[in-house]
Amino acid sequence: MASVIVVYPPDEQGARRVRVDGTILGRARDLRALTEYLRRAGLEVDDLDVVRSSLIEWRGGGPDDWEPA
């Protein structure tokens, strides 16, 4: 898995920026989108991995927080 995964707080639309090893992958609007971004980055994860992983730094709330700021 990547060394650093950061999921930023939800923005005004409820999307959260996703960064892996310093590269912004995009803005996820839910766990499914986040999982897809991580898969495209070459990580073999599923939705449950994303929720449980200690490698993900959740900023501004955890995996259940997707409400607009």
Image (cartoon, helix red, strand yellow):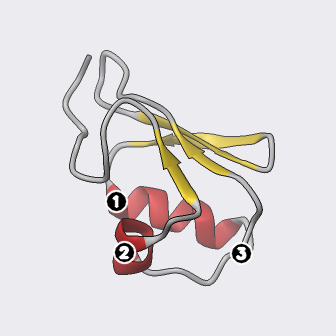
Q: Which mark is residue 31?
A: 1
Q: Which mark is residue 1?
A: 3
Cα–Cα gap, marks 3 and 1: 17 Å
Is residue 42 toward the left or the right of residue 9 in the image? right
Q: Is residue 64 above or below residue 27?
A: below
Residue type, mark 1 in image: Leu
Which sits in the foreground, 52 or 32? Answer: 52
Q: Which quadrant of the view contains residue 11?
A: top left
Q: Is residue 30 left or right of residue 42?
A: left
Q: Position of residue 22 (x, y in %)?
A: 80, 40
Instruction: Tell me the amino acid under the disc marked 3.
Output: Met
- x and y percent of residue 14 in the render? 29, 29
Look at the image and tell me in which quarter the N terminus lies: bottom right
Mark 3 or mark 1, earlier in chain: 3
Q: Are marks 2 and 3 in contact (CB under 8 Å)?
A: no
Number of numbered discs overlaid on the protein picture = 3
Name the residue located 71 percent from the left edge and 53 percent from the top edge: 4
The type of residue carrying mark 2 is Asp
Q: Which mark is residue 47?
A: 2
> Which residue: 34% across, 78% down?
48
Question: From the viewer's perspective, is 45 left or right of 48?
Answer: right
